[in-house]
Image (spheres, coloured by chain):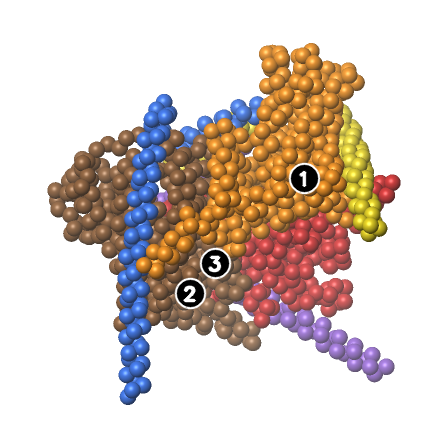
Chain colours: A brown, B red, C orange, D purple, E blue, F yellow
Amino acid sequence: MELIRQIWFGSGLYQITPGQLIMLGICLLLLYLGIARRFEPLLLVTIGFGGLLSNIPGVEIATGNGLLHLVYVVGIETGAFPLIIFMGVGALTDFGPLLANPRTLFLGAAAQFGIFATLLGALGLTALGVMDFSVREAAAIGIIGGADGPTAIYVAGQLAPNLLGAIAVAAYSYMALVPLIQPPIMKLLTSEAERKIQMSQLREVSSTERIVFPLLLVLLVALLLPSAAPLIGMLAFGNLMRECGVVDRLSHTTQNALINIVTIFLGLAVGSKLSAEQFLVPSTLGILLLGMVAFAIGTASGVLMGKLLNRLSSQPINPLIGAAGVSAVPMAARVANRVGLDANPHNILLMHAMGPNVAGVIGSAVAAGIMIMFTSS
Amino acid sequence: MELIRQIWFGSGLYQITPGQLIMLGICLLLLYLGIARRFEPLLLVTIGFGGLLSNIPGVEIATGNGLLHLVYVVGIETGAFPLIIFMGVGALTDFGPLLANPRTLFLGAAAQFGIFATLLGALGLTALGVMDFSVREAAAIGIIGGADGPTAIYVAGQLAPNLLGAIAVAAYSYMALVPLIQPPIMKLLTSEAERKIQMSQLREVSSTERIVFPLLLVLLVALLLPSAAPLIGMLAFGNLMRECGVVDRLSHTTQNALINIVTIFLGLAVGSKLSAEQFLVPSTLGILLLGMVAFAIGTASGVLMGKLLNRLSSQPINPLIGAAGVSAVPMAARVANRVGLDANPHNILLMHAMGPNVAGVIGSAVAAGIMIMFTSS
Amino acid sequence: MELIRQIWFGSGLYQITPGQLIMLGICLLLLYLGIARRFEPLLLVTIGFGGLLSNIPGVEIATGNGLLHLVYVVGIETGAFPLIIFMGVGALTDFGPLLANPRTLFLGAAAQFGIFATLLGALGLTALGVMDFSVREAAAIGIIGGADGPTAIYVAGQLAPNLLGAIAVAAYSYMALVPLIQPPIMKLLTSEAERKIQMSQLREVSSTERIVFPLLLVLLVALLLPSAAPLIGMLAFGNLMRECGVVDRLSHTTQNALINIVTIFLGLAVGSKLSAEQFLVPSTLGILLLGMVAFAIGTASGVLMGKLLNRLSSQPINPLIGAAGVSAVPMAARVANRVGLDANPHNILLMHAMGPNVAGVIGSAVAAGIMIMFTSS
Amino acid sequence: MRIIERLQIEADIVQGDLINQGLTLMLVGMGTVFVFLTLLVGATTLMSHLVLRFRPADEAVDAADDDVAAITAAVVAHRRRH
Amino acid sequence: MRIIERLQIEADIVQGDLINQGLTLMLVGMGTVFVFLTLLVGATTLMSHLVLRFRPADEAVDAADDDVAAITAAVVAHRRRH
Amino acid sequence: MRIIERLQIEADIVQGDLINQGLTLMLVGMGTVFVFLTLLVGATTLMSHLVLRFRPADEAVDAADDDVAAITAAVVAHRRRH
Ligand code: NA
Ligand code: NA
Ligand code: NA
C-alpha cells in the first residue's frame, strides 16, 4: 500500500507543474515545426526533444548529475561545442562566391547593424524600466541578430550564461523563421525593378585563392581583433582543411561524423535550458521580442546596403542578396533566391546570395569579438 | 647489474598473481567465444581485451590515471555511455513490428518477471546467509534478467557501483549465451503443435505512426514513471531521429560512428572491472548464478505469457516469440525464429519475434525505473 | 574616443611580440610544407594551424580556458589521445609482411639504437654544460628517434611534460623530413650491389596468424615489460579489431571517424605548445638538434643491421629496408622502396620494407616502456 | 544465552524484512510494468487508429529497404574480408 | 522629498549612461565591423590579383562533388599504401 | 679555493654519473629491446608453424582489397544517402 502511494507521489501526474505542461507543449510545437514544417530540423528536433526531457518532473536529466546537464557543462560552458561546430561550418562552407565577388562582404557588414541596434534596444528597455539587462546581457542578446547559432551560444556563454538558454532558442527559432520574417521586409524595401535585376555570372575561383583566404582571414583577425580569433580561427581552420586538398580524410570527418555528433549534443544541451523555471521568465519574452527586431533590422540594413552598392557599383547587384547578409546559412540565401524568382522566373540569385550569406558569418563573428572586447573588460 | 634486477622485479613474470593468470585465461576465453564462436562479438571482444589489459601486473591501465580507468569514470560512473548507447539502440530499432501488433508488448512485460524473481532470489540468498546483498544490490543484480547491457550498466551505476563489473559481464555473457540458455526452456514449456503455429503476416506501418510512437512513449513515461525517463527518453530520441526523416545525417552518425565509438570505450571500461581483485570474489559467483536464473525465468515467463495470449487472442500467436521478450536484441528473436524453424521449416517467426524483442527493451527500462524509484529513495 | 584607444590597445598590432611574429612565420612555414610539399600533411596542417592560433596576442586560446588548452589538458596530459591514435594505428596496420618474415623484427630493434644514443647525447650535452636536461628529459628527447609521433607524445607526457611541445614538433617534423634525412645515410652505408639486391616474394599469411599475433604480442609484453603495455596494448587491440573479422563496424570507425577526430584535436593541442614563450627557448634548439641526430643514428643502425642480416641469412635481404626500421610509417618504407628503385628499376621493396617499418613501431614502444620503467621509478 | 537468543530473533526479523521487501517489490514492480505497458498498448492502438483514420493517404513504409541496405553493407563487409 | 529627488536624478543619470553606452557601442562597433571587412575586401582582392598573376596556370576548382572527392581520396590512400 | 675545488669535484662526479647512467641505460635498454624482439620472433615463428600445421585448410588472406571494399562501402553509403 505504502509503495502504491510512493508510485503515485513519484509519478509525473502528481508532480508536474503547469509551467512544465506549457513547456512540454512548446517543445512538441518545436518538434512539429522541425519535422512537419522542416524548419531547421537539425536543431529544432534536438533542442525540442532536449526540452521535453528537461521538463519531466522528479528526475535529474537537465540538472544535477543528469546527462543533459553534464553535456551542457562540458560542451557549452567551456565554449567547446560552438567552436567545434564553427570548425565544421568552415569545413562545409564554400567561400568561392565571396572570393569571386569580395564586395559582397559589405552586405555581410551592413546586416550586423541588427546586432548593435538590438543592443541599444535592450539597454533602452532597461532605461525605461521595462526590462533589467546589464550591458553584457544586452550585448549577448544583440548577437541574436547575427543569425548564427554557434556565435550566439559562444557569446552568451562568455557574457551572459544566465540568458544562454533563451538566447540560443531565440537564435535558432528565428533562423528557422527566416522564410517568414524576411520576405515582407525585402519586398517592402525594394522595387519590383530592383528585385528583377539579374547579376552577371561569377568567375571561377582558383584552388590557391581558396587555400590562402582562410589564412588571410585568421591573420587579419590576429592583427586587428584578437577577441574574435577563437570563432574566426576555428572557422578558418575548418575551411583550410576543406580547401587544402591534402587532409581530405580529416575534412570529411569534420563535415560528417564530428559535426553531427556535436550537433546532437549541442541541441540536447540547449534543450536543457528549456526547463520551465528557466525559460518561463519575463526576460525570455524580452529576448524573443528583441531577437525578432534584430532579425528585421539586420535584414533591412542588408537590403538597403544592397541598394546602395547597386547604385555605386558598375556591375548590377540585386538588393535582395543583401538580406542574406544576416547569415542564417543557407536559409537566408535560399530566401533571397526564392523572392528573386517570384519577381523574375529566370533570375537565379542563389550563388550570388551565398557570398553575403557567408560574409554574414564572418561579420557576426567580428561583431561578437567587438562585444566581448568592449564588455568583458 | 642493479638494472637487470630492476627489469626482473618490474617484469610480469615476477609480479603476476595466480588470480591475474586466471583472469588472463578467462579473458582469452571471452575473446575466443567472441571471435571463433561469434557470441556477441562487439562486446565480448572489447570487454575481453579490456580485461586482458586490466590484469597486466605493475602498470596503471585500469587503475589510477590509466586510460581504461579514466574512461570508466568519465563514461560509466556518469551514466553517459549506457545512455548514449541507448540512443544508438533507438536509432537502430525498427518499432514497426511492435506497432503492427501492440499486444506483443505483453510478452515484453511478462519476460521482466525474471528481473523481480532474481531480486527476490538475491535477497533470499542473503537471508540464508549465503551471500550478503543489500536491497539496492539485489535490485541491480535483478536487472541482469533484463537481458539488456546498457540498462544493466546504467542501473548498477546508480544502485550498486561496486558490483557494476560483475553485473555487466554477467549481462553481456548471458546475452551471448542466449542461444544455449533459451532453446531447452522453450522446448520444455511448449508442445510440438504450439511451436508449429504460423502467424499471420504483419500489416504495414505508416511513417506517421513511426514518428508519433517515440513521442507517445516518452510522454507516457514522463506522466507515469519519471525515474525511467533517462533510459526511455534517450531510446525514444534515437528512434525519433531515425523515423522523422528530416535529420538523416544525425541518425546515420548515431547508428554508426557514434555508437561504434562509444561501444569500443564502453567495452574497454567494462573490461577494466575484470581485474582479479575485483572479479574473483564470492559475490561474482552469486551474481553469475543469479543472472543465469534471471535469464531462465525471464525466458520461461515470456513463453508462458505467449501461451496465454495464444489462448486469449483471436489470431494465432506462436508462444516461442514470448522468449524474445527478454530483449537481448536481436539474438533472442533469432533464437525464437530458429527454434520455430526446427519445428516447422516453413515458419518464419523473425519479424513476429522482433515485436516482443524490442518490447523487452522498453519493459526492462521500465523495470529499471521502478527499481531506481523504490530503492534509491 | 576612449573606445578607439581600447580597440587599439586590444589589437594584435599593438600587443604582438617579436617572438609571436617569428612563431607565426614558423607556423606558416609548417603549413606550407604540409600543403604545398605534402610533408605529413595530417599533422603539419593541424599542428601548424594550432600554432597560428596559439600566437595570437591578447586572447585565451592556448592558455587558461581557451579551447586548445582544454583539449591539451583532456587529451594529452592524460595520455588519452596518443593511446587512441595508437589504437587507430593498430587498426590501420597490416602485420602480414612482418608475419611472413619475422626476422625483420631485428631491423626494427636495431633502429631503436637511435633512441638510446640520443639519450646519451642529451646527457652528454648536459655534462658539457651546453644544455641542462635531467635523465627523464633526456629519455623523452631520445624517443624522438623512435620516429613515432604518438609514442613520443605519450612518453614526453609521462617523463617531461615541459618539453612535450618541442618533442612532438621535432618528432613530427623529422618524420616529415624522412625523405630528405634518410637517403644520403642509406647510400653512404650501402654498396650499389647491396642496393640492387632483390628479395624473394613474401608468403601469404593466414587470417588465424593475423588474429593470434596481437594477442601473442600483448601477452609477451604483459609477462616481460608491463610498462610498455599501454602503448603495445592499444596497438594490439586496434589490430585485433582489424583482423578478427567479427567487429568490422568497430574497426571501420576506428580507422576513420575516431582516428580522424582525435588527429584533429591532437594536432591542435600540440600546436598549442608552439606559443613563442614556450617554443623559442634554448632547449628547443637542443631538442631539434638531438632529434635530427636520433633519426640519423636510427637509420644508420637499421641499415647496418640489414647488412648483417643479409650476411647471416640464407635468403637475400636488401639492407635498404633496414632504414624503414625507424618506423615513420609508411614514409620510411616508401623511402626505402624509392632508393631501391633508383639502384634497380625492377626492384619493388615496398612490401618487404613494411615488415621492419611496423616492427619499428613495436620496437620504439618497447624502448618507451624501458625508458618509463627505468626513469620514472 | 539470552543475548544469543535475542540476536537470533533480530536476525530472523531482518531476514523476514528482506524477504517481505523482495516480495512487495516483485508484486508492485510487475504490477507497474504491466499497468504501464497495458497503457502503452492502449495508447499505441488508439494512436494508430487515429493516424489511419485522419491520414489514410500517408504512404505506408516498411523498413525493408533499410534492411536491404544493411544486407548490402554486410555483403560488402564480407567481401572486404575474402 | 529630497531623497526621492536625488534617487530620481541618479536614475536619470544611470539611464543616460546606458543609452550613451549603447550609442557609442553601436557607432564604434559598426565602425570596426566596416573597417575590418573593408580591409578584408582589400586584402582578398589584392591576394586574388597576386595569385592570378603569379599562378595563372592554377586550375580552377569548384568544391561541388564532395563524395566523389572522398572516394578519389580513398583510392589515392589505397594506392599510397601499396 | 678549497670550496671551489670541492664544487669542481662534485660537478665532475655529477657529470660522470650522468654519462654512466646514460651508458648503462643504453646497454641495458638495447639489450632488453633485442631480447624482447628476439623472443617475439621466436614466439611468432612458433605460432605460425603451429597454425600452419593444425589449420592448413585456413584460407590465406592478404589485406590488399581492404581499401577497395572501403571505397565500395563509400559508394554504397553515398547511394544510400541519395
Ligand atoms: Na551573421
Ligand atoms: Na529486457
Ligand atoms: Na620506431
Residue at mark 3 to residue at mark 2: CA–CA distance: 11 Å
Nearer the observer: mark 3 or 1; the answer is: 1
Q: Residue at x 28, y 78 (%)?
A: E9
**Callout 2 environment at 10 Å: few (<14), some (14 to 19), or many (20+)?**
few
Which amino acid lies under the numbered mark 1 shown in the image of this protein? Ile
Secondary structure type for disc 1? helix
Disc ID at residue C141: 1
Residue under pointer 3: A77
- At 77% from the left and 33% from the top, the residue drawn is F30
Q: In the rendered image, which quarter is residue B252 located in?
A: top left
Q: Where residue C306 appears, x then y in whole percent?
A: 73, 21
What chain letter is assigned to the residue under label 2? A
Q: Mark 3 and mark 2, same subunit? A: yes
**Residue at far front of view:** F1
Q: Nearer the viewer, residue A337 or B50?
A: A337
Q: Are marks 1 and 2 in contact (CB under 8 Å)?
A: no
| Chain identifier of the residue bearing label 1 in the image | C
Q: Report if residue C123 is visible in the image.
A: no
Q: Position of residue A185 (x, y in %)?
A: 19, 52
Left or right for C144, reference A160? right
The residue labelled by disc 2 is: A162
Whether B245 is drawn above or below A115: the answer is: above
Rendering coords of residue B173 (x, y %): 66, 48
